[in-house]
Image: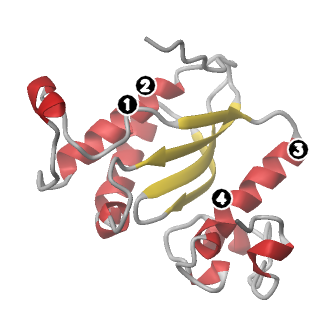
């Protein structure tokens, strides 16, 4: 079995990517955005964390969160979010025989990507990456046009200008393929 190493840093700030199991043409996350938001609210109420940036795309999501001082258990938060979302949506997906035997849904990839944010420059770069992602995936032409993002709240707070990356394109910001 692989030895997955996690960065257990009490009160740390992390960048995460979570993917649906079947990505191509799957819009489950945006189609059930209200269910996802409700699950995240419930998990945060029981296991607090701060959301710095979050974007939900049709079949994956990116976020930057911080845990309270002394807390390292982001894995619990993700287990509860993924499980809560899986229970909230109709069981319409194809499941492998392995997942059926284990009583698992066929919604999420088992693992997720996590990166411990190291400094302010790292934080800023990952915040930009989170918010440019809908443009990078050609879902919209402008960051402001994607509704499932903390970008709008951050504009209200003065963190980003409303037209951030509006005409620059992902290549100019260094996020092109």
Establish if 28 lies above or below 134: above
Q: Position of residue 86 (x, y in %)?
A: 24, 45
Q: Secondary structure at mark 4?
A: helix
Sequence-earlier tag: 2 or 4: 2
* Residue carrying label 2: 76
Q: Residue at x 39, y 38 (%)?
A: 43
Sequence-earlier tag: 4 or 3: 3
Q: Are marks 3 and 1 in contact (CB under 8 Å)?
A: no
* Residue carrying label 3: 120
Q: Secondary structure at mark 2?
A: helix
* Residue carrying label 1: 79
Q: Secondary structure at mark 1?
A: helix
The quarter in which the C terminus is drawn is bottom right
| Image side of residue 138 versus residue 159, left or right | left
Q: Residues within 10 Å of mark 3 (few under 14, many from 20)?
A: few
Q: Residues within 10 Å of mark 2 (few under 14, many from 20)?
A: few
Separation of marks 3 and 1 at Cα, in angstroms: 28 Å
Establish if 35 lies above or below 118: below
* Residue carrying label 4: 130
Q: Position of residue 175 (x, y in %)?
A: 75, 64
Quarter of the rendering containing residue 170: bottom right
Q: Residue at x 50, y 54 (%)?
A: 61
Q: Are marks 2 and 1 in contact (CB under 8 Å)?
A: yes
Q: Position of residue 139 (x, y in %)?
A: 52, 78
């Amino acid at each position: 079995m692989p030895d997955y190493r996690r960065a257990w840093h009490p009160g740390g700030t992390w960048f995460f990517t979570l993917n649906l199991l079947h990505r191509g043409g799957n819009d489950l996350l945006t189609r059930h955005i209200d269910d996802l938001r409700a699950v995240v609210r419930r998990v945060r109420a029981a296991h607090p964390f701060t959301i710095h940036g979050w974007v939900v795309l049709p079949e994956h999501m990116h976020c930057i969160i911080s845990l309270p001082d002394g807390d390292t258990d982001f894995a619990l938060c993700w287990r509860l979010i993924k499980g809560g979302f899986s229970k909230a949506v109709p069981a319409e997906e194809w499941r492998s025989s392995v997942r059926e035997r284990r009583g698992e849904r066929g919604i999420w990839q088992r693992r997720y990507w996590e990166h411990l944010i190291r400094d302010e420059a790292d934080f800023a770069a990952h915040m930009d990456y989170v918010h440019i992602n809908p443009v990078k995936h050609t879902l919209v032409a402008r960051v402001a046009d994607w509704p499932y993002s903390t970008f709008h709240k951050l504009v209200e707070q003065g963190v980003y200008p409303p037209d951030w990356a509006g005409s620059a394109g992902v290549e100019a910001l260094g996020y092109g393929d």
